[in-house]
Image (cartoon, rainbow, N blue to C red):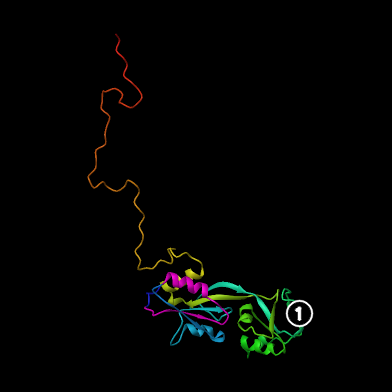
Amino acid sequence: MTTEPTRASFRIGFVPGVTLSKWSRLWQERRTDLPLTVVEADPARALDSLTGDDPVDMLLARLPLATDDDHSVIRLYDERAVVVVSKDHPLAALGIEHELTAADLEGQTRHDLDPTLTDAQAVDVAATGSGVAVVPQSIARLHSRSGLTYRFVSDLEPTVVALVWLVDRTDDDTDDFVGVVRGRTARSSRTRRRDEPEQTAPAKKGSAPDPRGAKPKRTPPQGRGPQRGTGRSRPRRGR
């Protein structure tokens, strides 16, 4: 782990559609000393946000990414695929509860497969009624508007959202954010700050020395009969 850098804030990049409100809230509760700044990243050049003049510390993006041994990657969750269509498209005639299959998309012009279009642009073209756009559900929600609808596609692979950062920039702050997204508790040993004193185990009861000095143990007197309170009595002498 590298030496802890001095930061004005901890910067998280994210691609459109990815939400981190829950993690932001947990971070603010646990790290009051370091504000969290979120920065939207271009999906086509998401990894570039980790480098450059004003880089982010970590990135939330969709796989696949052109990562290498210089990157750490944690898969967080899956997003189901949906097909976005105009409300007057034949596929929209099926109820919202109806899930399509890839076979239902055969013969349709899929604008999401056009490498010159972003997801947002593909949805815009689908909104005209010309063709469809298959995107993660969060993208469909992000660009929702009147005249558009979407349906789940049951047999298409989901999109994976991952947390990515540069290996050589791993430090206590990055490890703390990993702890947040992985659900570690606030007092987990891996989320404890290095500048906090280590907690020592409490001494066992009775192990601390008596400040008044040790008292000698009492030993029963020798050659005497049973002591009081034992429930036994001395034998009577004969008359």
The answer to whether residue 92 is seen in the rendering is yes
Judge left or right: residue 210 versus residue 100. Answer: left
Give coordinates of residue 13: x percent, y percent.
50, 81
At x 29% / y 22%, what residue is drawn? 225
As for residue 15 lying within the magenta part, the answer is yes
Q: Residue 158: x, y in percent?
A: 64, 75
Quadrant placement of the N terminus: bottom left
The residue closer to the viewer here, 38 or 195, is 38
Write the start and end of the magenta stretch as one range.
Answer: 6-31
Residue type at mark 1 is Asp
Tag 1 residue: 104
Q: Note whether 91 is above or below 226 in the view shown.
A: below
x%, y% of residue 19? Answer: 55, 77
Residue 96 is one of the magenta-drawn residues: no
Asked if residue 168 is positioned above or below residue 232 in the image, the reply reads below
100 sits to left or right of 16 = right
What residue lies at 62% left-to-right and 87% top-to-bottom? 120
Residue 134, quarter of picture: bottom right
